[in-house]
Image: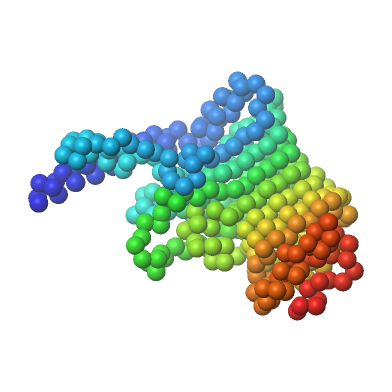
C-alpha cells in the first residue's frame, strides 16, 4: 500500500513539474502582449485573411477534450503512468481551470487578456483588413481579470475599427468533459458576480463601438454551462447587449441566442439598428420588464425591419401564460411573414397580441 502511494505521488509530482514548466513558459511568452504580437506578425505573411477566429480546444469537437490515447496493457504500470502524466500535465481549457484547486495558483494563469491583446496587435497592422471576427473560447474562471479601463476600451474600439470586420460572432463554447468535477450537484458552489458580467458587457460594447459591425451573432447557449451555471436563469444580471451602442452604427442584422436582457436594452438595440434591419431573438430571457412592453419597444424603435424572429421567449411574464397562449402568439404562424408577435413588431398588426393574454 505504501509503495502504491509513493508511485501515485511520484506521478503527480512529475505531472505537476511538466505542467508548471509549460505554465511558466506561457506566462513568459504572453507577457506584455508578446504572444499577440507574434500572432499578428504571422498573419501578415498569410495572403487574403478574411476570418479571424479565437478558440481553445478542438474547434470541431464540442463534447469532450478531443485528446485520445491508445489503450495500454493493464499490467504495464510504466505505460499507464506515462498516460497519466500526459493527461495531468496537458494544457487546460479556460473552463477547466474553474475546477482546479487551489484556484489562487491557477486562475491568474488563464490568459483572458489575449481577448484584448490579440485584436490590439492585429489592429496595429495597417495592411490587415478582415471580414469577420469570431470568439469561441470557453468561459474563463474569473472575468474581473480582464477588466478594461476607459482608455483600454477606446484602444480596443480603435483597433477593431482599423480591422474593419463587418461580421462579429461571440459564441463561447462548452466541453462536457471539462467539469464540474463534483459528484453531488449540491456541492457546486460556483459563484458568478454581476461585476464579471459587466466586464463582458463592456468588452462587447468596446467591439461594437468601432461602428463597423454590420452583422452580429451573440450566442450564449453554451456559455452558462461553461461558466459553471445550470442555465442563464442563474445569471446574476443581464449580459450580452448591456452596453451603450455607438451613434451612427452600421448594424443591419443581429441574432441573439440564450442571452439575458432587460426591455430597456432591447430598446437601445432597436434604436441602434439601421433601416430595414433583421432581428432574431431565440430563447432570450427578459430579466427586467415584460415581453408585452418589449414588443411595443421593438415596434417603436425598429425602422421598417426586413425580418423579425422571436422564438421560445423566457421570463418577462411569459411564465404566467398557458401553453395554448404561448402557442397562439409566439409559435403559430399568423401570416406568411411570421407569428402574431413578429407581425406586430414589424407593424403588420395594429394590436399588441400580448394585450389579450395578460
- Residue lying at 33% horizontally and 36% vertically, measured from the top left: 69
Q: In this view of the protein, can residue 298 be seen by the observer? A: no
Res 86 quadrant in image: top left
Q: Is residue 213 above or below residue 162?
A: below
Q: Is residue 213 above or below residue 266?
A: above
Which residue appears farthest toward the left when viewing the image? 2
- Residue lying at 10% horizontally and 46% vertically, measured from the top left: 3
**In the image, is 73 to the left or to the right of 86?**
left
**In the image, is 24 to the left or to the right of 292?**
left
Q: In this view of the protein, can residue 134 be seen by the observer? A: yes
In the rendering, at what x and y percent does residue 90 appear?
36, 39
- Residue lying at 81% horizontally and 76% vertically, measured from the top left: 355
Q: Count the marks.
A: 0
Q: What colouring does the structure picture have?
A: rainbow
- Residue lying at 65% horizontally and 44% vertically, measured from the top left: 169
In the rendering, at what x and y percent does residue 34 appear?
51, 32
Quadrant position of the C terminus in the picture: bottom right
**In the image, is 326 to the left or to the right of 30?**
right
In the rendering, at what x and y percent does residue 300 appear?
86, 63
Camera-nearest residue between 236 and 113 = 236
In the rendering, at what x and y percent does residue 194 appear?
56, 63
Amino acid at each position: 500500500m505504501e509503495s502504491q502511494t509513493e508511485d501515485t505521488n511520484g506521478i503527480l509530482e512529475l505531472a505537476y513539474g511538466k505542467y508548471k514548466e509549460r505554465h511558466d513558459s506561457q506566462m513568459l511568452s504572453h507577457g506584455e502582449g508578446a504572444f499577440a504580437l507574434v500572432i499578428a506578425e504571422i498573419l501578415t505573411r498569410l495572403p487574403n485573411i478574411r476570418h479571424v477566429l479565437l478558440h481553445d480546444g478542438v474547434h470541431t469537437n464540442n463534447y469532450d477534450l478531443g485528446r485520445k490515447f491508445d489503450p495500454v496493457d493493464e499490467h504495464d504500470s510504466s505505460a499507464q503512468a506515462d498516460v497519466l502524466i500526459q493527461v495531468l500535465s496537458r494544457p487546460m481549457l479556460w473552463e477547466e481551470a474553474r475546477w482546479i484547486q487551489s484556484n489562487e495558483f491557477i486562475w491568474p494563469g488563464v490568459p483572458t487578456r489575449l481577448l484584448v491583446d490579440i485584436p490590439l496587435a492585429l489592429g496595429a497592422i495597417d495592411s490587415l483588413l478582415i471580414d469577420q471576427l469570431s470568439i469561441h473560447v470557453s468561459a474563463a474562471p474569473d472575468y474581473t481579470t480582464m477588466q478594461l479601463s476607459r482608455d483600454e476600451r477606446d484602444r480596443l474600439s480603435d483597433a477593431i475599427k482599423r480591422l474593419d470586420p463587418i461580421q462579429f460572432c461571440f459564441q463561447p463554447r462548452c466541453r462536457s468533459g471539462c467539469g464540474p468535477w463534483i459528484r453531488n450537484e449540491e456541492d457546486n458552489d460556483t459563484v458568478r458576480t454581476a461585476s464579471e458580467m459587466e466586464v463582458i458587457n463592456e468588452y462587447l460594447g468596446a467591439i461594437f463601438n468601432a461602428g463597423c459591425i454590420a452583422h452580429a451573432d451573440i450566442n450564449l447557449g453554451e456559455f452558462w454551462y461553461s461558466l459553471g451555471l445550470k442555465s442563464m436563469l442563474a445569471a446574476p444580471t443581464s449580459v450580452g447587449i448591456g452596453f451603450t451602442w455607438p451613434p451612427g452604427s452600421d448594424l443591419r442584422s443581429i441574432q441573439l441566442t440564450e442571452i439575458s436582457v432587460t426591455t430597456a436594452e432591447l430598446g437601445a438595440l432597436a434604436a441602434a439598428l439601421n433601416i430595414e434591419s433583421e432581428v432574431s431573438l431565440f430563447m432570450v430571457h427578459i430579466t427586467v420588464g415584460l415581453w408585452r412592453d418589449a414588443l411595443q419597444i421593438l415596434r417603436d424603435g425598429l425602422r421598417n425591419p426586413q425580418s423579425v424572429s422571436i422564438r421560445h421567449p423566457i421570463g418577462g411574464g411569459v411564465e404566467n401564460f398557458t401553453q395554448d397562449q404561448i402557442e397562439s402568439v409566439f409559435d403559430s404562424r399568423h401570416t406568411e411573414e411570421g407569428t402574431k408577435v413578429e407581425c406586430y413588431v414589424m407593424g403588420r398588426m395594429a394590436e399588441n397580441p400580448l394585450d389579450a393574454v395578460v
